[in-house]
C-alpha cells in the first residue's frame, strides 16, 4: 500500500495478455466477500446461459466424430471441404470469389494472428497496430522481432483510424497495417467509406492490410458489417476470423487465415509455399471439428444469428444507459458491434485510486466484479467492459460499479451531488 492505493507491478506493453491480467484480478478477489462473482473482462459469451451455440453446430460435431472418418491427421493447411466451405461463406460478401486455396485453417483467430505476422516478418521490419487494440498482436510481433508502431484510434470520431498518423508512421520497412473491425476493444463498426479510405491509404503506402474480423457480422448499430476483403482488388487483405464469436464456440478453436488478393499483388508461388511450410509446423484444430464446419455454415438458421444480435443490442443498451449515470465514467460512443466497449475513467474525481489498474483491482476485491483495465489494451485510465452477459447479471455488476465509484468519489464532489 502506498498513500492508500494498491501497488501492482505491470508487465511491459509487449508482454501483457488479457488472460494474464484477468488471472491476477481473480487472485485479488476477497474470499470473505459474499457477493457472487460477475466477470465482465473476458470476451467469452459462453460464461452466461443466454449465449449458447446453435443445435446445428453441436449435432454436426457429434456426427463428424461418430462417423469414425475423422480420427486421423488432417492436411496441415486444413481439410479441403473445410477450406472450401469457408471460402464460399466469405465470398458471399465479396465482389469476387475466393478459392479454397486462399483459405488456411488455424487454431482459432489467435493462431491466424501469429501466421499473418510470421509471414510478413523480416529483419528491420515494422508493423502498424491500433491503440487501443488487442494485445496478442504486440506479443506475436515481439516474438517475431517486428518493431511495433502504434497508430491511434479517435474516440471523438467513433474510434476511426487516424489515417494521418498511419501515413506519418509508415516507411519502406512497414510490412503490415492491422485493423480490427468490428472493433475490439471499442465496440465500433467502420463504415464502407472509412474502410475505403483505409484501403486507399494502404495502397498508397504499398502495404497489405491485416483485417481482424473475428467479430464479423456481430453488429447492431447504424453501420452494417463490411469485410475489408471488399477492397482486395485495391490492396492485398489478409483476413483473420473464426467461428468463435458468431457461433459462440470460442473453445472449439476453429479459425482461418485468408488471402484476399484477386489481383495477385501479394500472393505468388513463393509466398504460398512459405505459408504451407509454416503450417507444417503448426497444430491446427481437431480434424472432426474441421469436418463439421461445412454443415455448420450451411445449416445454421438466420434466426440463431438474429437472437444473438438482439441480446447483444439489449445488453449494450443497458451498458450505455447505466454508465451515463456514473459521474467518474464517460463512454464516448454507444457500442455498435462486437461484445465490448471502452469507458474513460476520470481519475481526478476519485479520492484514493491511482490509475485504471488500481481501480480494477479494488473493484474486484470490494465488489467481486471483474473488468479489464485499459492499460491492457493500450489506453491508460480507460476501462474495457464486456457486455456479453445476461441482462440481469450485467445490471447487477454495473450497479455495484456505481456504488464503488460513489464510495471512492472525492468528498467535495459527493457534497455537490
Image (spheres, grey):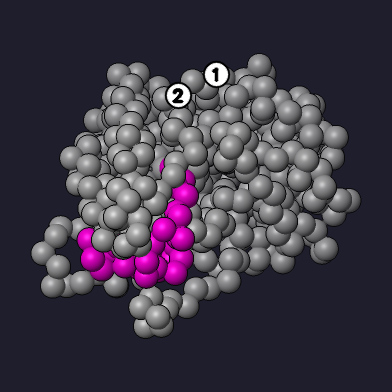
Q: Is residue 382 left or right of residue 391?
A: right
Distance from disc 1 to disc 2, alpha carbons, whole Å, reads 21 Å
Report helix, strand or loop for mark 2. Answer: loop
Q: Which residue is mark 2?
A: 221
Q: Are marks 1 and 2 in contact (CB under 8 Å)?
A: no
Task: Judge whether 76 appears above or below 67 on screen.
Answer: below
Q: Pointer 2: residues within 10 angstroms few (<14), some, or many (20+)?
A: some
Instruction: Tell me the magenta residue range.
Output: 341-368
In the picture, which quadrant includes the N terminus?
Answer: bottom left
* Residue 164 occupies quadrant: top right
* Frontmost residue, 287 versus 367: 367
Mark yes or no: residue 213 visible. Answer: no
- 168 lies above or below 352: above
Q: Position of residue 353 (x, y in %)?
A: 39, 68
Residue at the spot of label 1: 92
Residue depicted at x 76% and y 25%: 233
Amino acid at each position: 500500500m502506498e498513500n492508500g492505493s494498491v501497488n501492482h507491478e505491470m508487465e511491459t506493453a509487449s508482454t501483457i495478455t488479457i488472460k494474464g491480467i484477468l488471472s491476477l484480478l481473480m487472485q485479488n478477489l476477497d474470499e470473505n466477500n459474499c457477493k457472487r462473482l460477475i466477470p465482465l473482462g473476458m470476451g467469452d459469451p459462453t460464461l452466461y446461459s443466454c449465449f449458447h451455440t446453435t443445435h446445428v453446430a453441436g449435432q454436426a460435431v457429434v456426427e463428424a466424430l461418430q462417423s469414425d472418418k475423422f480420427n486421423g491427421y488432417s492436411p496441415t493447411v486444413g481439410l479441403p471441404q473445410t477450406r472450401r466451405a469457408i471460402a464460399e461463406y466469405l465470398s458471399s460478401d465479396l465482389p469476387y470469389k475466393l478459392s479454397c486455396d486462399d483459405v488456411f485453417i488455424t487454431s482459432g483467430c489467435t493462431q491466424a494472428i501469429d501466421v499473418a505476422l510470421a509471414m510478413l516478418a523480416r529483419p528491420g521490419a515494422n508493423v502498424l497496430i491500433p491503440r487501443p487494440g488487442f494485445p496478442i498482436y504486440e506479443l506475436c510481433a515481439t516474438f517475431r522481432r517486428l518493431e511495433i508502431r502504434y497508430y491511434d484510434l479517435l474516440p471523438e470520431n467513433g474510434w476511426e483510424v487516424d489515417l494521418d498518423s498511419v501515413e506519418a508512421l509508415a516507411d519502406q520497412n512497414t510490412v503490415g497495417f492491422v485493423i480490427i473491425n468490428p472493433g475490439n476493444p471499442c465496440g465500433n463498426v467502420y463504415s464502407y467509406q472509412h474502410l475505403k479510405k483505409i484501403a486507399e491509404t494502404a495502397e498508397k503506402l504499398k502495404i497489405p492490410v491485416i483485417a481482424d474480423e473475428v467479430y464479423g457480422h456481430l453488429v447492431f448499430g447504424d453501420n452494417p458489417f463490411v469485410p475489408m476483403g471488399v477492397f482486395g482488388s485495391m490492396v492485398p487483405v489478409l483476413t483473420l476470423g473464426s467461428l468463435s464469436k458468431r457461433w459462440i464456440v470460442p473453445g472449439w478453436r476453429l479459425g482461418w487465415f485468408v488471402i484476399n488478393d484477386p489481383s495477385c499483388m501479394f500472393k505468388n508461388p513463393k509466398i504460398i509455399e512459405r505459408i504451407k511450410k509454416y503450417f507444417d509446423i503448426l497444430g491446427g484444430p481437431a480434424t472432426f471439428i474441421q469436418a463439421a464446419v461445412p454443415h455448420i455454415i450451411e445449416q445454421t438458421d438466420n434466426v440463431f444469428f438474429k437472437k444473438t444480435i438482439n441480446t447483444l443490442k439489449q445488453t449494450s443498451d443497458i451498458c450505455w444507459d447505466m454508465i451515463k449515470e456514473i459521474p467518474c465514467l464517460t463512454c464516448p460512443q454507444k457500442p455498435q458491434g462486437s461484445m465490448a466497449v471502452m469507458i474513460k475513467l476520470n481519475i481526478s474525481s476519485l479520492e484514493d485510486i491511482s490509475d485504471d489498474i488500481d481501480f480494477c483491482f479494488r473493484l474486484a476485491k470490494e465488489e467481486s466484479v471483474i473488468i479489464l483495465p485499459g492499460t491492457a489494451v493500450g489506453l491508460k485510465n480507460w476501462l474495457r467492459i464486456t457486455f456479453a452477459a445476461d441482462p440481469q447479471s450485467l445490471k447487477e455488476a454495473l450497479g455495484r460499479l456505481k456504488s464503488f465509484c460513489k464510495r471512492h468519489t472525492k468528498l467535495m464532489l459527493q457534497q455537490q451531488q
